[in-house]
Amino acid sequence: MPTPRPAAPQPDQAHWWRSAVLYQVYVRSFADSDDDGVGDLRGLVARLEHLAWLGVDALWLSPVTASPNADWGYDVADYCAVLPEYGTIDDLDQLIATAGAAGIRVMLDLVPNHTSDRHPWFVESRSSVDSERRDWYVWADPQPDGSAPNNWVSSFGGPAWSLDPASGQYYLHNFLPEQPDLNWWNDGVRNAFDDICRFWWDRGVAGFRIDVCNMMIKDAALRDNPPATEDDPFIMQMFGQRPIYNGNRPEGHDILRRWRTLAGDYAPERVLLGETNVDTLENLAAYYGSGDDELHMGFNFPFIEAPFEADALADIVARTEALLPSGAWPVWTGSNHDVSRLATRWCEGDPAKVRLALLMLLTVRGTPVLYQGDEIGLTDRVFEEHELLDPVGVRFWPYYPGRDPERTPMPWDDGPNAGFTSAGVTPWLPLADAPMHVAGQRAEPGSVLHLVRDTIALRRRTPDLLAGAYRRLPAGDGLWAWRRGSATVVALNLSAERGEVALPGATGAVVIGTDRAREGSPVGDALALDAWEGVVVTSRG
C-alpha cells in the first residue's frame, strides 16, 4: 500500500480541489495486471505508489463503466457496472479505499450526453414509437423529402442523424451512430442521472469529470444551425456551421445547478469538473454560474489550444481571471486523451520547453491537471494508417490521425513492453516511440519527473502557490512573469533569446527552476533567464 503523505496546508478543507493536483488516468493504457494487453483497475492499484510518490491529490479516471467500446468507453451500456476488461465493482471499491488511505481521491468520468446504442434504455426506446422510453432519446420525423430532420453534423463527421427503418424516424447522435443522444428535456432522464450520481458518490467517488457537459440540451425546435463564417474557429468552418442549436443551450445550466445542489448533500462536497469545450472564455465563464451554483471547475480549451507563447497564454490567464465570477476557481491542463500531448503540441519534444510548460501549469493560480505521462515529458506516437483504432482517426486519415497518438500505454521501465504488460503480450495500442520511462527518470534527480515531483511538493508547502492571488508583472518580449500572493514570483522565458525580468527592490532566492543548478541562488533587482528557462523565487519588495 502506498505510504500516506502529510496533508497540504489547505486553508479550506471543504474545498480540497482548490489546492489539489489532479492526475488523469487513461485506464486502458495505464497498467495491465492480467496480461490481456489492456490496462485495468488492479493494474492501477499496483501503480498507486508512483502517484503517491509523485504527490498528486486526486485521480480522474477515463470511463470505467460497461461499454461495447465503439468509442473506447464513451459509449456507455451500463452506468452502474464496471467494464469487465477493467475488473469488477469490487476492484473499483478497492481502488477508492487504497488510494484514499494514501491521501488520493478518485473521480470518475460521467458521460451524460449519450449512451451506447446497446444500452437497455436505447434498446427499449428503439423497440416502438410507443415505448415508455421513446422520449428518453432525441427522435424526429424526416423532412418531406425523406432527409434528416435538420442540418446538424456529427462531431465525428457526417450527419448527426441516422434513420431507423422500422419506425421511419431518425435518432440524433452528435458523435458516432452507436452513441445516440439522450433527451435531457425528459424528467425520466434527469431522475435517472440523479440516481447514477448518488450510486457512485455513495461509494466514495469524489466527483465527476462531465463529458461534453455543454452539449446535453438541444434546441427543442431542432432548428438548423447557421452557416459558419470566416471569422469563426477553424473547426466550425471545417463543418460548415456554427453549432448553436445542438449544444451550448441556456437550459443546460439548469442541469448543472441541479447536480451542484445534489453534490452539496455530501461531505466533503462532490466535485463537478466540466469538459467545457467552448470557443470563448465568456462561454466558459457561464458554466460556473454565479460562482458557487454550477461547475466547480471547467476545462479551459482556449488555453489548451493556444500557442506556446508568452503573450498568448498570459492573455488567456488574465481574461479568465477577469471573467470568472467571484468565488470561481480556474483549472489548467495541457494534455488529455483527446488532444496531442503538451510535450509534442506545445514543446515539439524539446526537454527544456517541456520543463517550462510543466512549471507553468503547476504554479499559475488554479488547479493543475496532469495527464498520465506528462510527468516524464512523454510525447505522441506517430501512427501508420493500419495501426489506428480510434474511429475519428480512421475516418479522417490522412488529414488527422485521431486520438491514438496520445493514448499509448504508459512506459514504466526498460523491460518488455516498457512494464505496461508482460513480455509476449501485444498491448492494445503500440507503445510510444520516445525512449523514456518512469523508472529511468526516478533514478535521475535531474529528470523531468523529479522537477514535477519537487514542484508539487513546493506547492504543497507554499500558501502563496495554493491560494495566492495572481498578478502579472512587467516583462519583455517572450517573457511571462507573475506574482502569487505576497512573496512568490514565477518567471518564464518562452523564447529562444536570453531575457531579463525586473524585480525592483526585491530580495529572495530561486526555490525551484527548470535549471536545477540555479536553486538557492539569490535574486535581486533583475532576474536573468536563459532561453526556455523558468524559475520560482521567493521575493519581497
Image: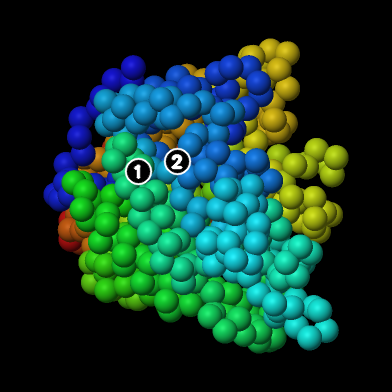
Which residue lies under the disc numbered 1? 199
Residue in the picture at 69% in, 30% down: 428
Report x, y in % for residue 366. 33, 56
Residue 31 rendering spot, x and y as whole percentages:
55, 25
Kind of residue indicated by mark 1: Phe
In the picture, measured across the screen, residue 296 lies left or right of residue 225, that is left
Return the x and y of residue 460 as percentages of the image width and height. Answer: 25, 40
Name the mark on residue 298. Answer: none
Q: Is residue 5 visible?
A: yes
Residue at horizontal 59%, vertical 33%? 29
Q: Residue at x 43, y 79 (%)?
A: 250
**Image quarter in which the C terminus is found:** bottom left
Tell me the element at label 1. helix
Instruction: Please say if 461 is above or below 427.
Output: below
Front in this rendered view, residue 220 or 445: 220
Residue type of the residue flagged with mark 2: Cys
- Please give left or right for residue 336 compared with residue 486 in the image: right
Label 1: few (<14), some (14–19) or many (≥20) C-alpha neighbours in 10 Å: some
Q: Are marks 1 and 2 in contact (CB under 8 Å)?
A: yes
- 224 or 19, which lies in front? 224
The quarter of the picture where residue 426 lies is top right
Q: Residues within 10 Å of mark 2 (few under 14, many from 20)?
A: some
Q: Secondary structure at mark 2?
A: strand
Q: Read off the residue under disc 2.
A: 80
Residue displayed at 48% across by 77% down = 249
